[in-house]
Image (cartoon, rainbow, N blue to C red):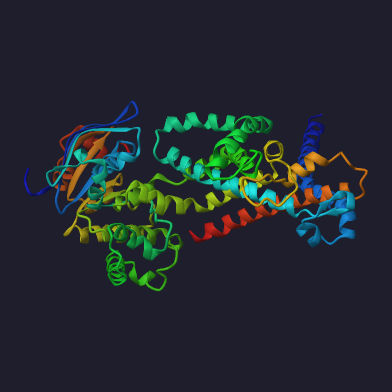
Amino acid sequence: MKRFFKINRKIRNTFHKRWMLLSLIVVIAMPIVLGVGLYLKSAMLLEQTSLIKLLFSKEWKPMQGLFGLWPFIVSSLWVTILALLIAGPICLLAAIYMTQYTKKYFLRMMHPVIDILAGIPSVVYGVWGVIFVVPLVSNHLAPFFNTQSSGYSILTGAIVLAVMIIPFILNILIEVFRNIPDQLTEASLSLGATHWETVKHVLVRKAFPGIVSAFGLGISRAFGETIAVLMVVGNVTQIPKGIFQPGYPLPALIANNYGEMLSIPLYDSALMLSALVLFVVVLLFNFASRMAIIKLERHT
Amino acid sequence: MDNQTKIHIKNLNLHIGKQQILKDINVQIPKNKITVILGPSGCGKTTLLKSLNRLTDIYPDIKVEGSIEIDGQDILKVKKRDVTDIRKKMGLLSQRPYPLPMSIYKNITYGLKISGRRRKRFLNKRVEHYLKQASLWDEVKDRLKDPASALSIGQQQRLCLARGLAVDPEIILADEPTSALDPVSSQAIEEKFVELKERYTIVMVTHVLRQARRIADHVVFMYLGEVVEQGSAEEVFGNPKEERTKAYLRGAFN
């Protein structure tokens, strides 16, 4: 009886190990399945037109069978880069201030606040964008720069997006700066450097790999963000010539059109291709920022 | 005060939040001697050392009262923006070496550049001079452009010493500078200190009794945030007056 019990335990041990392995495989397989699926779906279009032509053509005329993705790619790039330009410096300065200049309890207090910001559903940010940022851009920012804007523009999308990615970038940066030992600060100060010189020459340099990864992950998130951007960016198929013009980023294209107009041949396939582009870009960005960290860490 | 006293600490009290770390400290540190602050872990030795060059300023939770006179000037009264001048008077060597995230060469020139010395030839000379003083030159002269983190721990600690000396201090503050090092590197640092005391006033924190016996001229014994006993090394080690000092020297607590 005792012996039987022992064997039973061992079988269970093996069984549970397999079960956990299976879960792991599911997790690993998911992105691969997703990527292959998207490729198979977009293959129909790719057989007809070359990938380069699809990516860089300006003509998006589904009725005529023209599916140039360039306007959407450009819009996505504009919105993402602009959002990072707004959010990056803010996060960097805020993280340095919180970790270097404030009392400890302040940081403890800020952590849940940042988490709350990160947890707000993106549609809420979208509504805030429509109610607040759109009028701000059309009534104040655009006239200030001597142009006209409906308010539904690249800039509006970028501002909303910046606010959305701030908590993500900030959380990583706080961790990065907190992990720098105080003794490094002390070493720099003891050599006669001011606090600011220490931040500029020592801490930022030490944190550089972390900053790159935080910004990289912020970009990945911004690039794929859909609903909040879609609500404020205007969704006009064109290559935006300025930040006060409307644009039409890739995620918005998919969200707005999938499920409709599928009677048009290859439309479905074109949307799948844009999803694939999105997928690959985000993947590449994640990969690149990780590689950058590994390389940089070796050099400092 | 006499000419032989470099640092005079009077009625120093230090709190971190609500906790009192240093209680009514009165210490005189003699010039051109090695003063060892001795005591078990967690008795406030390191905190005392850090308050000497106002590194306590960067922790908003810390409150300091009392006075610390260096050459007769109360450094706790110095305005925040002039505090870098005080810190430049003191080189700091911490428990583990913390090389700045840059090349070996730049680690040495960092302090000089901040004080506005930028001429290449001057800097090159200085780098060589101080690396030689820290007995590191021969090991690194062919790879000055390499990151400092590529050096061994012992080498890094000597680099930190060289970097501290390069800003031309009067005082060297050392916080258990050998605790992370192997015996050979430890010995090198100790020998260096004995050599350097001719020109610098050295304050070293340690909890290693044997090390204190080896190199101390003057001893300050601390226990639980208080100074229990202080005096010359012969007095404190040869003829301790306080019970707690005797107990510590016997090895009753560590």
Q: Quadrant of the N terminus of chain B?
A: top left
Q: Nearer the viewer, residue A160 or B59?
A: A160
Image spot of residue A184 (x, y percent): 39, 49
The residue positioned 38% from the left and 54% from the top of the image is B97
Image spot of residue A63 (x, y percent): 89, 49
**A153 left or right, relative to B187:** right
Image spot of residue A104 (x, y percent): 42, 33
Image spot of residue A243 (x, y percent): 61, 47
From what the image shows, is residue B154 above or below residue B24?
Answer: below
From what the image shows, is residue A127 above or below residue A297?
Answer: above
**Residue B179 in sight here:** no
**A168 left or right, relative to A232:** left
The residue positioned 21% from the left and 60% from the top of the image is B196
Furthest residue toward top: B18
Q: Nearer the viewer, residue B96 or B170?
A: B170
Q: How many marks?
A: 0
**B125 left or right, relative to A216:** left
From what the image shows, is residue A19 above or below residue B6?
Answer: above
**Residue B109 in sight here:** yes
**A81 left or right, relative to A193:** right
Q: Quadrant of residue B79?
A: top left
Furthest residue toward left: B2
Q: Nearer the viewer, residue A162 or A140?
A: A140
Q: Quadrant of the C terminus of chain B?
A: top left
Q: Quadrant of residue A15?
A: top right
Q: Nearer the viewer, residue A160 or B159?
A: A160
Q: Quadrant of residue A167?
A: top right
The residue positioned 20% from the left and 50% from the top of the image is B216
